Image (cartoon, grey):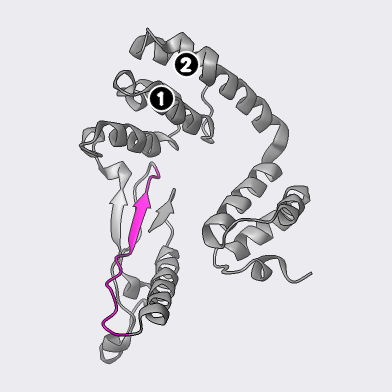
């Protein structure tokens, strides 16, 4: 599975690498054929919807018909949250609440949609609500503590202040202050670390320190390399 916040034509190349790695590892362990089926899936939560093809062969453009039977061919499944009605995200109340937060997190009108995002809050545990608020706090779309408090007071009047005082307000005030202080370069450094952890594994502390101490130009170059990296050396070189 690959998770995307915006349409990306190269996603199909990423999925191909995943499929090849999965099947290669499986064969090394189990040996006998047949290989197990691997279902490639893209989960997209960008606000504008998925706009590129799901067919791998489309990456090649116009291919002469005699060659087509020899081309790599697969179609990936797609879960596009923008195209799914809120109440159809899941039959499970808790999962629906979390998926709805994922659906709206990048929308520019997030602050105006808080009551939609938190509509199930009164039927969730306070811990679940706080997890959703924490996720909202990490959105690139700013949401003020005041807007959050107003939404909670309308939806969960019995617990609004408890949530804000015990969890939400502290998190949001600190998060806003940290976000303003760290600047664009530090934000990209954090994105690079998260990408490396997904692609390769845990980032050593020394390397993490190097990333956060680097200038924005270096971080952007590393980000470009990290998209297809399978080892740290291919991103940063060998020391």
Q: Which residue is labeled 1 in the image?
A: 129
Q: Which residue is labeled 2 in the image?
A: 163
Q: Earlier in the sequence, mark 2 or mark 1?
A: 1
Q: Residue at x 26, y 87 (%)?
A: 69
- Is residue 43 highlighted in magenta? yes
Name the element at disc 1: helix
Q: Is residue 36 left or right of residue 164?
A: left
Q: Position of residue 227 (x, y in %)?
A: 55, 63
Q: Position of residue 213 (x, y in %)?
A: 78, 49
Q: Is residue 18 placed above or below 96 in the rendered structure?
A: below
Q: Are marks 2 and 1 in contact (CB under 8 Å)?
A: yes
Q: Is residue 63 placed above or below 19 in the rendered structure?
A: below
Q: Residue at x 70, y 45 (%)?
A: 185
Q: Is residue 65 left or right of residue 114?
A: left
Q: Residue at x 47, y 11 (%)?
A: 162
Q: Which mark is residue 142?
A: none
Determine crowd level at label 2: few under 14, some 14-19, many 20+ residues with C-alpha closer than 10 A.
many
């Amino acid at each position: 599975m690959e998770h995307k916040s915006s349409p990306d034509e190269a996603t199909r190349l990423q999925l191909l690498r995943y499929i090849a790695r999965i099947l290669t590892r499986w064969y090394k362990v189990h040996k006998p054929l047949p290989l197990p089926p691997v279902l490639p899936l893209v989960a997209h939560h960008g606000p504008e919807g998925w706009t590129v093809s799901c067919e791998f062969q489309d990456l090649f453009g116009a291919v002469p018909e005699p060659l087509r039977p020899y081309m790599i061919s697969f179609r990936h499944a797609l879960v596009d949250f923008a195209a799914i009605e809120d109440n159809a995200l899941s039959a499970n109340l808790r999962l629906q609440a979390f998926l709805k937060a994922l659906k709206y997190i990048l929308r520019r009108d997030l602050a105006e949609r808080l009551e939609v995002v938190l509509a199930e809050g009164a039927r969730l545990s306070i811990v679940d609500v706080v997890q959703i608020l924490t996720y909202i706090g990490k959105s690139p779309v700013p949401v003020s503590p005041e807007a959050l408090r107003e939404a909670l007071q309308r939806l969960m009047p019995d617990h609004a202040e408890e949530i804000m005082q015990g969890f939400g307000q502290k998190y949001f005030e600190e998060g806003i202050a940290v976000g303003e202080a760290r600047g664009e370069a530090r934000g990209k450094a954090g994105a690079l670390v998260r990408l490396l952890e997904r692609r390769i594994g845990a980032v050593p502390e020394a390397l993490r320190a190097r990333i956060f101490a680097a200038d924005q130009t270096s971080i952007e170059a590393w980000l470009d390399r990290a998209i297809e990296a399978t080892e740290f050396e291919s991103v940063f070189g060998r020391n």
